Image (cartoon, rainbow, N blue to C red):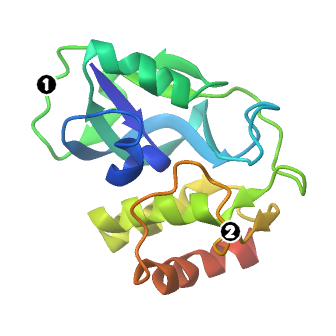
Amino acid sequence: MFIFGYGSLINRASRQLTGQTGQAVPAVVEGLQRHWGKVDGSYAISPLVASLGEGRCNGVLLKVEDNTLAHFDRRERGYSRVEVDPSLITHNGILQFDAPVWVYVKANPAPPCANQPIMQTYVDTVLAGCLSISDAFAKTFIETTFGWHHPLENDRESPKYGNLAGVEDVHIPVIDRLISPARIHG
């Protein structure tokens, strides 16, 4: 089966903290809107969430084995895992959808706030993953993610995001440059 990862699962090093996956194939899913939002009270931060409906969302398709899916379900606690119609997926690979494609969604999440802000190390992890694909992929990620104007805590000196991985020093100035216009204009 496949998982469509639209946040930290884009980052190979971060997703390997949870379980092994096949190759990550960049893709776009129509009818999926990504934004920053609260999942539930067990999260100290506001991660990325996606809702079914309008919009489009870039991310990666990950092939996972049946026995690995439970590990990703635990990682994505508080989200609902729903099946994606393969006709809504665009990718440049030669994937055969001979198994379900899953995505983790959250309906009607509350927006980030000062008590559960967006964490910079979470942003860094996701964008390092995007940059490993291409600069254009990272820009599309930023442009198709809503809620950049919500509170953001810079925790780089003392990371609070538990799946921080794969972020190199060279990524930091690039990430800051990429998100600056989004943070200013919302």
Residue at left offset 32%, top offset 51%: 12
Disc on the earlier residue, 2 or 1: 1
Residue 100 seen in the current view: no
Residue 79 seen in the current view: yes
Q: Nearer the viewer, residue 130 or 30?
A: 130
Query: In this picture, is 181 found above or below 24?
Result: below
Q: On the rendered image, what quadrant is the N terminus found in? A: top left
Q: Does residue 108 appear left or right of residue 79 in this picture?
A: right
Extreme-front residue of the structure: 158
The percent coordinates of residue 30 (x first, y second) are: 44, 37
Q: Secondary structure at mark 2?
A: loop
The percent coordinates of residue 140 (x first, y second) are: 45, 62
Q: Does residue 72 appear left or right of residue 97 in this picture?
A: right
Query: On the image, which quarter does residue 4 sit in?
Result: top left
Local crowd at mark 1 within 10 Å, few (<14), some, or many (≥20)? few
Q: Does residue 116 appear left or right of residue 10 in this picture?
A: right
Q: Nearer the viewer, residue 131 or 97?
A: 131
Disc tally is 2
Extreme-right residue of the structure: 114
Query: In this picture, is 162 found above or below 108?
Result: below
**Amino acid on which the number 2 mark rests in the picture:** Ser
Query: On the image, which quarter does residue 69 sit in?
Result: top left
To which residue does mark 1 refer? 96
Extreme-left residue of the structure: 94
To which residue does mark 2 refer? 158
**Amino acid on which the number 1 mark rests in the picture:** Gln
